[in-house]
Image (cartoon, helix red, strand yellow):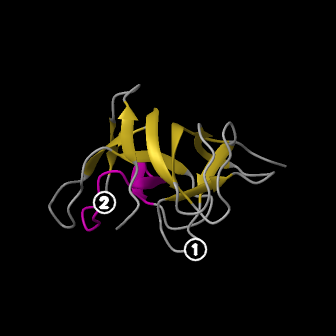
Amino acid sequence: MALECTLMIETHQPIPMTAINANAIPKGSVCMLSDPYTAEITTGDIDSCAGIAAKEKIASDGTTKLAVYRGGIFKGYAGAAGVTAGMAIVTDTATGAANELVVAGLNAEHIVGTALETATDGQTFLFELNPFGIQVA
């Protein structure tokens, strides 16, 4: 995998979440939330964000727990639509890479956090991880 996020300032301790034994998850991967309380690598646009993997999870290693950050300042990669400082960001896999992030659309429901810098496609930028979801009518 490529384009993993890098922790720049630790503001929260990672928490243990469930991980699927068969899955590999590189450190720094943006993870989506699935039931029950499970973190997996994001696979789609605007996935519900569980957080960012604090450690590597090796496939089929017998481990079913993963340390996940749900807060902090990270360096990440902008997707094709780019990001703007101060705007909410979401996952973007439309152009290939699972860890790319873009500005949230008008009715986005699954927010990863807030961009702290402006960046265009492929550039790195700082963002505050603060995953949350809202119901949009």
Callout 1 amino acid: Thr
The number of numbered badges drawn on the structure is: 2
Q: Residue at x 68, y 46 (%)?
A: 84
**Which of the 4 image quadrants contains residue 93?**
bottom right
Say if 123 sits above or below 59 in the image.
above
Distance between the alpha carbons at the discs numbered 2 and 1: 20 Å
**Residue at the image position 30 percent from the left and 43 percent from the top:** 54
- Residue under label 2, please give it: 25
Which amino acid type corresponds to the residue marked 2 in the rendered image? Answer: Ile
Q: Which residues are magenta?
A: 21-41
In this image, 46 relative to 124: left or right?
right
**What residue is shown with label 1?**
95
Q: Earlier in the sequence, mark 2 or mark 1?
A: 2
Q: Residue 9 placed where, x, y %?
A: 39, 30
Residue 82 relative to residue 58: left or right: right
Q: Is residue 38 within the magenta segment?
A: yes
Question: Which of these two is toward me, 78 or 21?
Answer: 78
- Percent across and percent down for residue 106 are 81, 51
Answer with the quarter of the image where residue 86 lies. Answer: top right
Task: Determine if the magenta segment contains residue 135.
Answer: no
Q: Residues within 10 Å of mark 2 (few under 14, many from 20)?
A: many
Image position of 120 with respect to 129: above or below: below
Where is residue 134? Give x, y as percent: 70, 42
Q: Is residue 35 visible?
A: no
Q: Name the foreground residue: 85 vs 62.
A: 85
Q: Is residue 70 above or below residue 42?
A: above
Q: Position of residue 36 (x, y in %)?
A: 43, 51
Residue 67 versus residue 121: which sits nearer the camera? Answer: 121
Secondary-structure class at tag 2: loop
Q: Residue at x 36, y 42 (%)?
A: 68
